[in-house]
Image (spheres, rainbow, N blue to C red):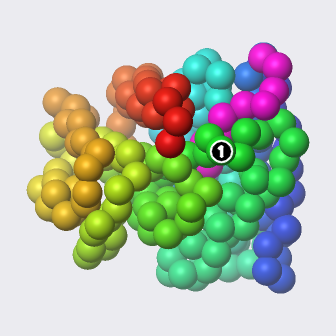
Amino acid sequence: MPIIEVFIPGRGLTLEGCLDLPDLSPPFPAVLLCHPNPLYGGNMDNNVIVAVSRALVQEGFAVLRFNFRGVGLSEGAFDNGIGEQEDARECLKFLLERDEIDSRRIGMGGYSFGGMIALSVGVQEDAARALAGISPVMSRDILKGCTKPKIMISGTKDELVPTGPILQEVNKAEEPGEIRIVEGADHFWWGFEEQVGKMVAEFFAGCFKKKL
């Protein structure tokens, strides 16, 4: 699995990222992954983000993992989710401009805080054709009216982002959409990484086998 270190130009800053590629011939469908809250140690090498990336690459996807501003070698400082949305937009633009990426088949996903960023941006950006949230922090009406394919994954023992509020927001969205609940998983997904990676990879593979 080739891993390419990339530096992504943003508005006044540069972001550090890794482009994980399958051992196949391009162009590839792609997924942009957003990591959890950096104030609590979140970065692009998070256990859930890496597991999801591996599962996607095995399904033939390119994956862009990146560090939000102020994390790792990314410039800038934490911006309470506002600047981080701009970071995600710049990374989406970066994918669209890569020759090895099929620009008609790009999805966005994220975990926890990163789920909120991925969903907020993905709902608005036409280039993001399908969306995935893993224990996503759900702001009010974040999915309201969204007609893109989407999956939300939640653990039954998640006390930080419980299933109830996620389900409420999913119910405000338009079809197609689903929520998958994993028995015994808490917010950190230790021991469940492979399972959640498989769920996300199968979802995006299903989406991009048909024209979106």
Which residue corresponds to mark 1? 104
Label 1's element?
strand
59 displayed left or right of 69: left
* Residue 22 against residue 158 in the figure, above or below: above
* Residue 156 against residue 93 in the figure, above or below: above
> What's the residue at 61%, 18% (across, down)?
58
Q: Measured from the top left, where is residue 124 in percent x and y?
A: 50, 69
Q: Measured from the top left, where is residue 17 in percent x and y?
A: 76, 51
> What's the residue at 64%, 75% (across, down)?
86
Foreground pick, 188 / 211: 211
31 in the magenta segment: yes
Q: At label 1, which amino acid type do we have?
A: Arg
> What's the residue at 78%, 31% (across, down)?
27
The residue range painted magenta reads 24-32
137 displayed left or right of 86: left
149 displayed left or right of 89: left
Quarter location, residue 162: bottom left
131 in the magenta segment: no
> What's the residue at 36%, 37% (across, down)?
189
Foreground pick, 134 / 42: 134
